[in-house]
Image (tube, rainbow, N blue to C red):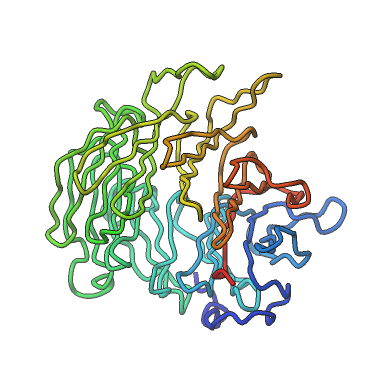
Amino acid sequence: MALSVAWLSCGGKYGGGTNPSKVKFRAVVSNSLHPVTSGVHVPALEIIDATTDKLSFTPIGLSALPDLGGLDVASNKTLTLAYSPGGHMFELVNNTSEAASGTPVTLPDATESFFLANNIQHVYAAVPNAPMPSGVSGAVIQIEVSTGRISASIPMPNVRFIREVNRGDQILAFNDNCVMSIKSAKIGTSMDPRLQTFCGLDHPVGAGLTDNLTQPVILVCGRECGGTSDAAVIPLDISTNTLGAPIAVPGATVATGIGNTLYVAGTPPGQTCASGTAATTCGMLTVVDMTGASAPQSVQIPNGYHDKIAITTNHQVAVGSHDCTEISTSSETRGCLAFFNPPNNAVAVAPFNGNVTGLAPIPGRNVLYAVQGGTFVVYDTTTDKFMPSDHQTAIVGDLVDVKVIDNAP
């Protein structure tokens, strides 16, 4: 499972103009089928100039992978982590040289939740079917960035999701009933890194973060995820490892925060839509004031399973789902992406169909990049509509995710 010394040389600070593409402000799009010649395709990261929205014709090839899915970017923008769902492999890309390591690491089984740690020393992945000596499958896998080796497996039965909290000091891991708090610094030492496990929760699926770093908020999915209870969010004080009182919300599968406000999205089973759309069922976005620990308002958004959320430069909340009810008629086109404008509580649904698999607000610009239905699209977040055609880039292939890999110029 060694990744070779290529993983050792992935650091360094990006300097404008030193990379092969010569693009100073970049976003990358994961593409499983970048065309090379007629009938020949390879996985690659397509480079977008995030100032002009133009495609650079210097993709980063990842031919050692069978395909490409989700991405993560280092906190200092030096590395991009690329995941192959077909091979359940990771590969690192050096953002300065725009070169892949060429020697991926293979996980014991597939993951749907992973991240490159804030300290850029480890990669973590939730692997629900990882074989364990106990005979009970499931572990949080740690990979050393410096060596490309799997260096630890923290047992957790059927773990599905993980989230880094408190600037990387702790990891929260989730299965269908429990949330486990893991101390990152204790992994690989003689001390047990598992600080606390909270069980009896109805399908916890992740955590939302606000500016209060010591209080992540657990998302309890409940009925939407096959459980029996209503959805809720539960504050977790990681300084004392205690859970607060649940706050009822209509749905909770994804969340993001700004200040002390948490935006939580989900699709309550049987939630009907208000008039104004041909859709019959809707999701809900709830604004939770964590200062008063209340959920004062909810607005309707497209349904589906919400797992993409981002706050744009002009402080709109973009929420994306997959498997939503799409509308495409002469009078209405309605897809899986919604924009919420907090000052006036208005919701705009993007008039474009397809599952939302990637969202990337562009720092310093009122622009959102999205991958919907395998297509790369660019939105003006002042109008919540497409940017003009000269800002839209047609990328041939099978696209999944999009990430910004430079700080704003």
Residue toward you, 118 or 214: 214
Q: Quadrant of residue 62?
A: bottom right
Residue 122: image x %, image y %?
40, 71
Q: Is residue 63 visible?
A: no
Tell me if residue 409 comes above or below residue 288 in the rendering.
below
Residue 383: image x %, image y %?
60, 42
Tell me if residue 323 comes above or below residue 155 in the rendering.
above
Q: How many marks?
A: 0
Q: Is residue 196 left or right of residue 252?
A: left
Q: Residue furthest right?
A: 38
Q: Where's the C terminus, which quadrant?
A: bottom right
Residue 378: image x %, image y %?
66, 48
Residue toward you, 300 or 233: 300
Residue 48: image x %, image y %?
69, 61
Tell me if residue 370 comes above or below residue 253 in the rendering.
below
Q: Quadrant of residue 95?
A: bottom right
Which residue is drawn at the image coordinates 29% and 41% (left, top)? 288
Which residue is drawn at the image coordinates 53% and 75% (left, top)? 78
Which residue is drawn at the image coordinates 64% and 56% (left, top)? 29
Q: Is residue 198 visible?
A: yes
Residue toward you, 234 or 61: 234
Q: Is residue 407 left or right of residue 109?
A: right
